[in-house]
Image: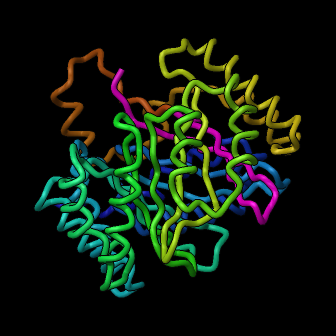
Amino acid sequence: MRDERMLDDYLRELVTQTPQDLIGKKSFKGILGTAHLLPGSVVLSTFGFECPLSSKEAEADFLVSFQKKNNGPFLLKLSAEKNFGRSAVWNDVGKLADFWAGKQLIDDFWLEFDIQGEAPLVPSLFFRPLYNSLAELEIILNYSLSALTGNESTVQLSSQVLQLVALLPDRARVFQIGAMRSRPVHGIRLCIHEISLDAILTFLKKIPYPGSVEELKEILIFLQPLVHDVAFSIDLSEGIGAKIGLECYVNPNFSAVEKQSAWTKMIDKFAERDLIDAAKSIALKEFGAYTATGQLFKELPEELVRAMALMERHAVSTMWQYLHHLKITYDPRRPLLAKAYLSVQHTWR
């Protein structure tokens, strides 16, 4: 049976539980309008908010994941069907859902909505490829790039991706391949993790990177004492883009107190470089993990009802909301920008 309730039905309680200095009521209204496009059962997968930190405006974009363990291919296809004809991008979402269901070469899929942009109902598309070799990654690219980008001819782009990945250190992984379909840009974004700060610089020196490696080195030196891990993103189209995204993480094995201390230190240092507005700095520090049980759900999703019937009595359906990571975007043509990514995740306790 299809879940006729939509995602916005389950998000309205978050309006009062999320700091308004980070996501204002006007921005949340836009998020709810976009969430109405998606099946309600998506609430059982991770979703979140992208909050620009440099400006005073409490604006945010909306991100939602589809996970294999939570019937991801079916829900992604259902989302595409519900929005068929709204944009050609949704038709491509359907094709990618079919690819995922048929080949099982994707771990999870993300839709990102630019709520403040010109096309807030058109998603950008990201997925995590499952591969153990360049040959396996090539298969994924051959099947997915055309639908991901909306372009029929992707042979050159696929070759460019494979050439770059071949230059990464052995441990480094592409953990997301994306296309910003809601924006007037072409090409894809590669997100790479399991790579050291020094290895990022070494990699950029190997490729025809058009930005300043020395400027990036200064940023990484600034980040080194603050972060446990950094992932980076790079854009590809007809060439390599100069913009670099640096995702900053604290140690996932830290206790809640240790995480709070690490985030506070990072936020303070970002604020010293004028990367975070003062009010947003305070809001981020106060944004600790919290639990919300039944009050988030006015009516439980069908999948949750079935799962609860199978769980032991002490298991409680719980929503966690927490700071997932901070991101610095380097673009030699513009000042540094910082964003916070707030995550909401369903777990059993």
State the quadrant of the N terminus: bottom left
**Residue 122 seen from this side:** no
Quadrant hosting residue 110 = bottom left
Q: Which residues are magenta?
A: 321-349
Quadrant hosting residue 26 = bottom right
Q: Is residue 51 left or right of residue 297?
A: right
Q: Is residue 248 highlighted in magenta?
A: no
For the stretch drawn in magenta, what is the main secondary structure? strand
In front: 28, or 112?
Answer: 112
In front: 85, or 302?
Answer: 85
State the quadrant of the C terminus: top left
Quadrant hosting residue 59 = bottom right
**Residue 75 seen from this side:** yes
The image position of residue 290, as x and y in percent, is 56, 26
The image position of residue 204, as x and y in percent, is 56, 50
Q: Is residue 249 above or below residue 111?
A: above
Q: Is residue 251 left or right of residue 193?
A: right
Q: Is residue 122 above or below residue 304?
A: below
Residue at x 36% of width, y 77% of height = 90
Q: Is residue 330 above or below residue 153?
A: above
Residue at x 45% of width, y 30% of height = 293
In front: 324, or 130?
Answer: 130
The image position of residue 340, as x and y in percent, is 66, 44
Colouring convention used in this rendered image of the protein: rainbow
Q: Is residue 238 left or right of residue 65?
A: right
In front: 326, or 137?
Answer: 137
